[in-house]
Amino acid sequence: MSVANSDVNYINSPKGLWSWLVTIDHKRIGIMYLFTTLAFFALGGIFALLLRIEHLTPGRTIMDANQYNIAFTLHGAIMVFMFIVPNVPAAFGNFFLPIMIGAKDVAFPKINLLSYYVFWLGAILAVCAIIFGGVDTGWTFYTPYSIRTNTAVIFMASGAFIMGMSSILTGLNFIVTVHKLRAPGMTFFHLPLFIWGIYATAIIQVLATPVIGMTVALLIMERVFGIGFFDPALGGDPILFQHFFWFYSHPAVYIMIVPGMAIISEIIPAFSKKTIFGYKPIAYSSLAIAFASFIVWGHHMFTSGQSYLASLLFSVATIIIGVPTAIKIVNWVATMYKGKVSWETPMLYAMAFIFMFSIGGLTGLFHISLAVSVHLHDTYFVVAHFHYVMMGGTVMAMLGGLHYWWPKMFGVMYNECLGKIGAALMFIGFNMTFGSQFIMGNLGMPRRYYDYAERFQPLHQVSTVGSWFIAASFLLTMSYLIYSLFKGKKAPANPWDAKSLEWTIASPPPTENFLTDPVVTEPYPYGTPNKARSHA
Amino acid sequence: MAHHGNHKEEHHHVTPLEIFHKVFIALIGLTVLTVVTSLYDFGMMNMVVAMAIASLKAALVIMFFMQLKYDNILNQLCMISAILFVAIFILITASDVIVRDNGRPMRIEKAAQGGDDPALMNKLRAVTDDQVAKGKVLYANNCASCHGATGGGDGPGAAALNPKPRNFLSGEWKYGSSPTRIFTTITNGVKGTGMSSYSGMSVEERYALVHYVRSISPQKSDDSAEDLKAAGLDGDFSKFKPKQMVDVGIVMENMAQVDQVELPQDRQKFSDHPGAKLYAQHCASCHGLSGQGAKVTAVGVNPPIALYTTSWNGLQAGWIQDSSAFKKIVSEGLTGWGKPGIGHFNSDEWSQLYSYARALSGR
Amino acid sequence: MSGHHEVHYVEGTKHAIPHHFNSGYHEFDASKMGMWVFLVNEILLFSALFVAYAMFRAKDPVMFHEASHQLNKWMGGLNTIVLLFSSLTMALSVGYLQRNNTKRASQMLILTFLCAATFMVVKYFEYSHKFHAGLLTAKFYTFEGISAGHPGLFFSLYFMMTGLHGLHVLIGMGVIAWVWWRTRRGDFNEHYFTPVEVTALYWHLVDLVWIFLFPLLYLIG
């Protein structure tokens, strides 16, 4: 298969802002999603920095208690609904899923564009919530407080509802695309593992997201029409809200992490120059996680007063979900064994992922044992746990993927040296910020508290200084990436000598993706050097 | 355009139109059937019958109107997965909501510590300074919040309780002051009051409490033979094994609940009587509009109970014949019976209320 | 290097096959699967309400029993038959298109639309009766004829379930009107009728939901 690096590609043909806004090209939609979600990431990050600065000293530092409640709610809601859920599937998934299975586009390109604008509609409503006084319920909207507070819950809830619809449309598109548009020879077990991950994610999106839609819709109805489902005064059950909420939001945790794992499954073989170890277990484990994620939601509710029976069932089911997760980690490490490992920036982020995600995963075991969970519930231990998974996991994977695919997406190379510095800063800053929170949580520092006892101050200060390292790392990363767009060295078609289909076409790819129809024989063919594959 | 491969069949399935008509007739038949069955009462089976017919109708629509019977496996899988995940959603949620709300607290048997050893029980029954000291600490941790730090029945929790907790300094005892009697009270709790069972404590701890409480009371008696027999201390000791009767979460939930009263639907009698208004404000919510008696459920006590107030019609009880007995019962309540103390009336109001209650009893 | 390639049309229509599909059937197949995946999502959307129904009913069956007497089962039954009939006509319209009988197909679509409208009119009368009687959502519930429990919850469920379903009927009416217009314009034939097919799938789901709502709300008395 020949590669013709040409000046005509998806970025410059056709030209003009309008052609981008109405594009149905999955690559352009992916790029728009990428920059949109990164912008929201920055917004959510600003709230996070403010929270950390507030905790520099006990009592008031820069904001009062109500502003603090609003700040942590907005940090959570923006990060969850506007960054981490849409980011990897909608940005990288949109861009690479069709290319990696040898298709010219997703199954429904117009629905794809629609999902982008639906996302914006939801995002605008969420921003309205910020403008009209913010929300102070926490991103979980727990009743009955969320029924009674006077803040802009309705705006934020409708924003979440509408962004959920966008997420569903993306998931629907991906499921059909994977089933119906694979190139000849691309059987399910020739799919790159990134596709398996995105596919599993899409299934969760379609099955779980409608329930959060209904849940927040009912919350709005509760506030407007007083339907009483979640209001004990009217005969309702506030814990039922938590069931509804977590029926989505626990699977949503896997909407966040499985795509991250999917990226890692691509990066590790590419930088170990070795076929992935245990292809089928990794593929199946994605589906296993997708299924199991639906039967564990109640582990968020051990102290809510739910029945012992339910707590017991959820605890056992949650232990089971550790198995497929561990399978993935073991196989990644085994892939590197006796490989020719090179330490470019994407691989550094992948290593950070494995290290921090393992910590995040293992501390999860503390929470699923019923007795220990009571001690740790709603402490900084939980905060640290899910940041190790969400940020140490998904965000590291996202940054790894961003660096891995940056040459393919934009046809330019970033500065490798600065990349490594950025990754190192991130690693140090992250572990300072959240490692200290494990200790604080175990000592009894409750989460979502404005004030704290003086003995926690040193740890809070470590955490705050760590957050500045993270911010510095992001600023550095974004500056050299944006710089590379204008002044970067031109990227070859396959700078990493990787083997999946996206590397067989030009960087950046032509609008049509494939000039000749690709044929696939096996995934990750590192053992059999394929001369037809171009190493530019 | 040779790629994207191997489609086995590239044609649309065409269903004969008669099938649609037949299915429609079947659906109408089933609709009539479900309406007809709803006119009869099968008890618990009502729901099962209605859902069975609805599922059959749904299956017909899915198989023939939506043509899933002739469709490919992927689309069939879609439908199956939808049903599967709805089932998961319902069943697991039910494992909490339905189990949690049936009001039957879980019993957790804990390993006994000497509860079935007569020698130990008799040893513990005898007071020692060591035990009193130990009991004092236990009292401060477990009892003082309601019974008061000094035992005056005036702890911070007492304000919310009705009936009020025992004042140990008064020297009055409702359930006996002998060690075994107090031990039984601590073990079983007092139904209808805020006094819950402390059988989760070891026998030794409970006896330590007994001796401390006795040490601060001005008046107490020793164990008689009947006391020991009534408590079962003359033979079977197994019932003193520590066990936790009631889950704290359930207690909290029930304490927070509003009392529910099933009142007879009626109009108030003698509504122009001067005491009628006072009665309606303070008594009718439990005793009925005209003293007919009522069922009071989910009162804020532990364990949650149902109370029945008796009808006053033709009542011969002492309190209805003696205004001072009436005043005492109304103002102090009946500990252990769920009757709260209601006071703060002036002497005119007392006599109006007494006279009204007598009128209701037919005097 | 040109991004342009030959445009293929489905036989006998002006429908251009998008470049990422092999054939008209390939597109049909993918669209239909897309619709099925969407229906899964719809079922899960409704499921939250069914779960709420199951939980509240399990907690207070007596209240549900009494409250459901306030619903008119004959109106509900009429609506059931109307919707079942509309499902039949919808299925027939696809059947006629597959036989190239565009005229009958568009007649069937009109019938479907009219049934949907009838359903909404009956619903309107039911709702206005509830509004007058004070049978409203829990907070605004003022009806005094039911003594057991919190009957407002039942009517909250009633309004949420039938309201969401009614919203789907309204959206369905819009889509049916659109495919009817396209059918009349002659866009469809035996080789290309994807929009009608997926609309039919959607409409049958709306029917399906009602098949469960009817006994759960109207017939438990």
Image (spheres, helix red, strand yellow):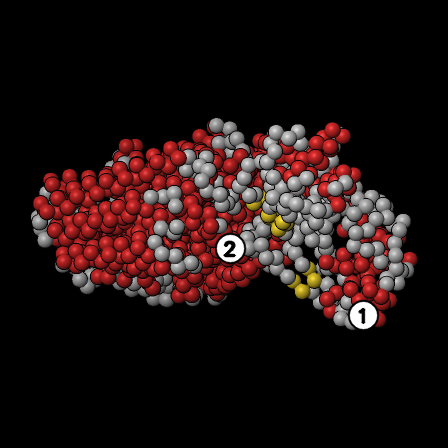
When the figure is inspected, residue C91 is found, relative to residue B73, above or below; the finding is above
At 55% across and 43% down in the image, what residue appears? B264
Q: Which mark is residue A323?
A: none
The mark closer to the camera, 1 or 2, is 1
Q: Which residue is mark 2?
A: B98
Task: Confirm or deny contact between disc 1 and disc 2 (CB under 8 A).
Answer: no
The spot of residue A450 in percent (x, y) is 63, 36
Where residue A260 appears, as percent x and y from the top left, is: 45, 52
Q: Amino acid at mark 1?
A: Asp
For the C terminus of chain B, which image quadrant? top right
Q: Of residues B27 and B176, which is closer to you in this image?
A: B176
Q: Chain of mark 2?
A: B
Name the foreground residue: B276 vs A324. Answer: B276
- Residue at 86%, 67% (x, y): give it: B123
Quadrant location of the N terminus of chain B? bottom left
Instruction: Give the mark, 1 or 2, whose residue is nearer the N terminus.
Output: 2
On the question of residue A363 being in view, the answer is no
Label 2: few (<14), some (14–19) or many (≥20) C-alpha neighbours in 10 Å: some
Q: Residues within 10 Å of mark 1 (few under 14, many from 20)?
A: some
